[in-house]
Every structure is written in structure tokens, then in C-alpha cells.
Amino acid sequence: MTERPLLEVRDLSKYFPVRGGMLRRVVAQLKAVDGVSFDVPAGKTFGLVGESGCGKSTLGRAVLRLHEPTAGQVRLAGTDITALGRQELVAWRRRMQIIFQDPYASLSPRRTVRQTIREALDTHAIGDNDGRNAEVQRLLEVVGLRRQVLDRYPHEFSGGQRQRVGIARALALKPDFIVADEPVSALDVSVQSQVLNLLAELQRDHGIAFLFISHDLAVVQHISDHVGVMYLGRIVETATAGDIYGEPRHPYTQALMSAIPVPDPKTRRERIVLPGDVPSPIAPPPGCPFHPRCPQAMDICRVQLPPTVNVGTADSPHEVTCHLYDEADGVRADDS
Ligand code: SF4
């Protein structure tokens, strides 16, 4: 029997009302996340990629209910998080944490490292005073910081050190699942690999599952077991990292992958340049939302939303939402 994934996201949507006119009536809905489904097994990483503004961060926050979902379900260890009342949710929040993109903005400038990390232990009344202090020191060691920094303030640290403090804070409640939202984007390249290695180490040692959000395809490839590619609030392709990077099937994924630099100077990859910008999620194009930019768009793409097709196997699904693939057997329509 296959083990149930730790996190199951089903048809999750998050719409924001758009108000206009003198009376500030709702005139439209901004569909930041629109019917997204994916799983994250315990101890694994699901990488989420896409251009800026595609809804990745909103999805991460909706999974944790930091943004209240408009529709859909999020199950953690079989419990539907979206159905919990406020009180019950507080208890479940211990198991689900977030690491933010900007270590400069996510730490209070008026709180020391000790206060920042201890806050969660105080809020959830975990241990006594001595126990909490000892736990803060242990967490600092886990993220590779010295005890001497305990009473320092965020401005006294480098970006990488601040992100380590943010990670220690996320670990304080011993979560099973962490949303890492662009956790290395604000860091120098040399520090990025140190933080990525730390996250990989924490996963190995503590079995934490990650939803790893990034616009950087090389970073996602490095850290992910499975990858989802997002465009205009929807996941358009999902598979193992090996399959997505080895054989991208959706035209949008192919364009993204073509932009990754190849380390070998003798190997040339033809870059697919997409015309135009990502359309507004307030008024997405009809049919396939990618059709105005898609180099392979067909007539049907302009009028009909494509189905999601498994072009992989039952054991190792590779799902693509595109009319190029046939719903019945998952082959390209022009191959058959
Ligand atoms: Fe391109 Fe059509 Fe596939 Fe959309 S459905 S990605 S427009 S080929």
C-alpha cells in the first residue's frame, strides 16, 4: 500500500476582490491561485517555479492559511486544515512553518536573536524558562550560529546570518512541513549554497517536508524531489525534478528551461524567447491562458481550457496541462 503524502493540496484557489467606482463595489476577481493540486510526501521537497507574479507566494501562504483560501482543501497528515476553527488552527500551526524571502524585513529590528527564536516557544508555552533558553541555544547551533550572538539585533548580522536566524525560528516548534518562500533570493550567490545545504541537512536529519518556492530554476533543480511549474495561478506541469528538467513537456516549461545557463561552454541550447508579458490575472486570456505567448498555440488553445494529462506512468506521473497531449493516452496530439 502506498503511504499517504504528508501534505495534500486539492483544487486550492485564492481570489482577491478588485474594487472600483465611487462605492468601492467588487468589480472583478483577481485569481492569484486557481484550482491547484499537488502532494508533498514526508521528508521530501516540492519545488514551485514560475515567473514573478504567477501566484507562487500566494499559494504558499494559502497552504498555511496565512491567506484564507477561497476554495479547495489542504490536508496535513490527513487533517483538512481549511476546515479548522481558529483555535484548532493555532495547534496545527506548530506543524507548519514558513521561511520568508527577505531576512531583512522578516525579523523585528527591536528584538534580539534570543527573543526572536524564543517567541514561538513562549506563545505555545513549550517548556519552562530554562528549557526554552536551552532550546534557543540548541537551535542556534543547529543553524550554525554561535551562542555569543544571542543578545544581538538583526542589524548586526549579514544577510546569510539573518536567514539562519529565520530558519532557527521556523524550526523552534519542530514542524513537519515548511514553506520556504524564495529563501535564498536576497542572498549573495556564495551564501545561497550555504543556506541551501543547511536546508538539505535539516531535511535529512529531521525529515522535514518543504514547499520550496523560487523563480530560480537552477536552485529548484538542486533541492527538489518533485517540481510544479506555475503560470497565471495554475500548475501547468508537474513531475519528478529529473523528468521536468530532463524532458520538459509544456511549452512554457520548455521556454523556462531553455533560459538556464549550460555549464559546458561547448554545449549550446537554443533559447526560446516568449513574446509579451504575463497577462493580468484579473482578466486572463480565454482558453489556455498561455496561448498569447505560446510558440505552439493552435486554434483550440484560444477557446478551450486544456485538460491535464499524465504523460508519465502510473507509478511516476508526469502531468501536463496542454492541448498538445492527448487526454486518453498522454501522447502528443501530433504524434498519434
Ligand atoms: Fe500552447 Fe496550446 Fe499547450 Fe496552451 S494548450 S501551452 S497554447 S499548445
Image (spheres, rainbow, N blue to C red):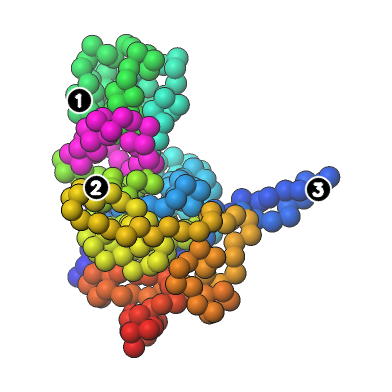
Q: Which residue is mark 1?
A: 144
The residue segment tinted magenta is: 173-201
Q: Secondary structure at mark 3?
A: loop
Q: CA distance from mark 2 to mark 3?
A: 46 Å
What x and y, as percent, mark residue 116?
37, 22
Give, as a three-letter code, the residue at label 1: Gly
Residue kind at label 2, given as amino acid type? Ile
Q: Quadrant of the C terminus?
A: bottom left
The span from disc 3 to disc 1 (Cα, nearest Å) is 53 Å
- Image position, residue 269 (x, y; %): 28, 58
**Magenta stretch encompasses residue 196:** yes
* Residue 196 visible here: yes
Q: Amino acid at mark 3?
A: Gly
Q: Indicate the secondary structure of the residue bearing disc 2.
A: helix
At x 29% / y 23%, what residue is drawn? 161
Estimate how packed mark 3 is, as few (under 14), some (14 to 19) or many (20 or more) residues with alpha carbons within 10 Å.
Answer: few
Tell me the distance, in whole angstroms, between the alpha carbons under discs 2 and 1.
20 Å
The image quadrant where one finds the N terminus is bottom left
Identify the image quadrant of residue 198. Answer: top left
